[in-house]
Amino acid sequence: MRGTDQGRFCEEFSAGYYGICTLGGMLSSGTTHLVTTPFDVLKVNMQVNPLKYNRISTGFSTLWKEQGPSSLWRGWSGKFCGYGIQGGCKFGLYEYFKRLYSDVLVDRNKTFIFFLSSASAQVFADVALCPFEAVKVRVQTQPHFAKGLSDGFPKVYRTEGLAGFYKGLFPLWGRNLPFSMIMFSTFEHSVDLIYTKIVQKRKEDCSRVQQLGVTCVAGYAAGAIGTVVSNPADNIVATLYNKKAKNVLQAVKKIGFFNLFTRSLPVRITIVGPVVTLQWFFYDSIKVLTGLPTSGGLRRRLEEPNLSA
């Protein structure tokens, strides 16, 4: 099958289109983050207690022996709900802002539009995620804090008030804004590069299978590069939520400048690369199933007669 015009559920850039993008983002992000919960539990513990959990292999065995196999799935509800909501906001709003900015900022560099669109979307997405992340990190690193969201939310509110849910918002923005900007921009440029230099055809002239293949390759590149950029802020978030430091400056001093970039990086790459790839694959699969084209490219670029010219 060529293109995706047949059986289209709704028109691009309509309210229905943004609704599909939001739903696709929720399902793809929620399910992929749920599957990687054991790696996330280990990652957070490596960040908070690096002497005890200093390697991936020994870290898993230590958690298993001391806290049982169920400890590897601690915080799964926060992962699924929190990152599902964040993913819906992130992908849905990115599509909206990309169209808005590409129409308003006609003469601006497309990289600037990708950066601005992803940053705008991520600001709202992290506000939605932050309360879930606050509970999740505590549940994963403090075995007796709570079992999950149902008892974790009331406990955080009772002991720390509303501010307890947003203590890590600025570090979360510090982690996710650079990641999102690099991730979306890398994805967009990778998609363009693959179609123009490797496939040498317009996206609309490729089969659905080919389009999803391009999505996976571009998604992996986006996830790997974004992980390296966002690693320092990820370490700071874990340190603040577990009260190992009172503020960002104290967290940086405690962790050490070099460790900001290297601590838990291998396990994060192990998690984030495949997760982002699967997110883009599931997200674009939902688009394809509803008759929409896969992601990548500004609207005015897609309307050009020949991308390979």
Image (spheres, rainbow, N blue to C red):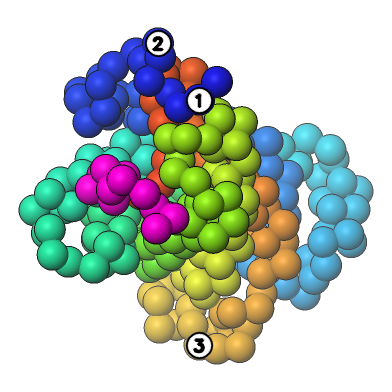
Q: Earlier in the sequence, mark 2 or mark 1?
A: 1
Q: Is residue 215 above or below residue 113?
A: above
Q: Looking at the image, do the residues carrying marks 3 and 1 touch, with CB atoms under 8 Å apart?
A: no
Q: Quadrant of residue 155?
A: top left
248 with respect to 301 (left or right): right
Q: Quadrant of residue 153?
A: top left
Tell whether position 92 is magenta.
Answer: no
Element assignment for label 2: loop
Amino acid at pointer 2: Gly
Q: Which residues are magenta?
A: 298-309
- Residue 123 location, x and y as percent? 27, 53
- Residue 69 location, x and y as percent? 84, 38
The answer to whether residue 153 of the structure is visible from this angle is no
**Residue bearing the label numbered 2:** 7
On the rendered image, what quadrant is the N terminus found in? Answer: top right
116 with respect to 190 (left or right): left
**Residue bearing the label numbered 3:** 253
Q: Earlier in the sequence, mark 3 or mark 1?
A: 1
Q: Nearer the viewer, residue 16 or 134?
A: 16
